[in-house]
Amino acid sequence: MKRRWLSGVLALSIVCTSLFVGCQKREETKPASSNETTQAALKDGKYKAEASDFDERGWKPFVEVEVKGGKIAVAKFDYANKDGKLKSEDAEYNKNMEAKVKTGPAKYTKELAAALIEKQDPAKVDTIAGATHSVENFKKLSTGLLENAKKGDTSVLKVTFETEEKAVALKDGKYKAEASDFDDKGWKPFVEIEVKDGKISVAKFDYTNKEGKLKSEDAEYNKNMEAKVKIGPAKYTKDLAAALVEKQDPAKVDTVAGATHSVENFKKLSTELLENAKKGDTAVLKVNFAK
């Protein structure tokens, strides 16, 4: 009888312990929702960004998005002229461009808008052969626009392009942008630049861990990555930094085979950092990345 009673107590203890551990695990995993992290960035509403002036051919690019439930639900990209006509609806323009490069604004504007809805991040939108310049315009407008969406600022964002930008020189100084948190592998990407005479003269891109060690100096990491994709952070971080100094525009930096994700991180950090450099804001810029 005593043995049967002890067995019953033991079984009850096991059940209670299992229930407690199960509840504890559910409570612990709740804050780690990546979906919550992603959606928290954008505020619901309608937003628009456009070039601050018409280009030399009389067109002004613009991007419009509608955010619902913290995500981009609707997106539109196009060019308008002074008469309000859209490039995507210009039959003659489309015919001539398609004959040369097999695509035209009637097609690529819709593809880019759809890609933004799918990816939820301009940096992750692929380029389109024959429309590289428009892809750059689209990404630049979208990146600035999403910064407004994070703040809930629904005023029309005016963005400077190319020849206009020469008049909006970067302000001399040292600037830094970094991810607001470490990624799931324990690394935090960052970009540092120095501006002299209105131009980027020095640039650095890398990842750091909580101990302050750099990914580019992690011999084991580099060895493993190079064995898989023929390149590692020791090389691609320097390549990207050098390209930024050369091109002076993150949107014009080419991708690096085998390091696509890091190129996206680099472009996002650099694009937002240059906005600080235009204002002369030398505070470290914290950039949110979806986990």
Image: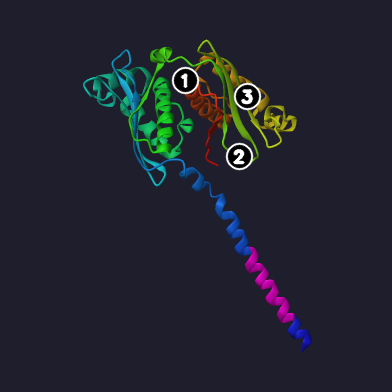
Question: What is the magenta segment's predominant secondary structure?
Answer: helix
The amino acid on which the numbered mark 2 sits, given as a three-letter code, is Asp
The image quarter containing residue 7 is bottom right
Residue 252 visible in the displayed image: yes
Task: Name the mark on residue 237.
Answer: 3
Task: Name the mark on residue 278.
Answer: 1
Give the Cα distance between marks 3 and 2.
17 Å
* Number of marks present in the image shown: 3
Quadrant, the N terminus: bottom right
Ranked by sequence position, the earlier of labels 3 and 1 is 3
Name the foreground residue: 116 vs 280: 280
Say above or below: 258 vs 19. Answer: above
- Magenta-span inclusion, residue 10: yes
- The residue stretch that appears in magenta: 7-21
Ranked by sequence position, the earlier of labels 2 and 1 is 2
Give the structural element (helix, strand or loop) at label 1.
helix
Q: Position of residue 178 (x, y in %)?
A: 58, 31
Quadrant, the C terminus: top right
Q: Which-is-in-front pick, marks 2 and 1?
A: 1
Say above or below: 40 vs 109. Answer: below
Give the Cα distance between marks 2 and 1.
28 Å
The amino acid on which the numbered mark 1 sits, given as a three-letter code, is Lys
Residue where numbered disc 2 is placed = 183
Ranked by sequence position, the earlier of labels 3 and 2 is 2
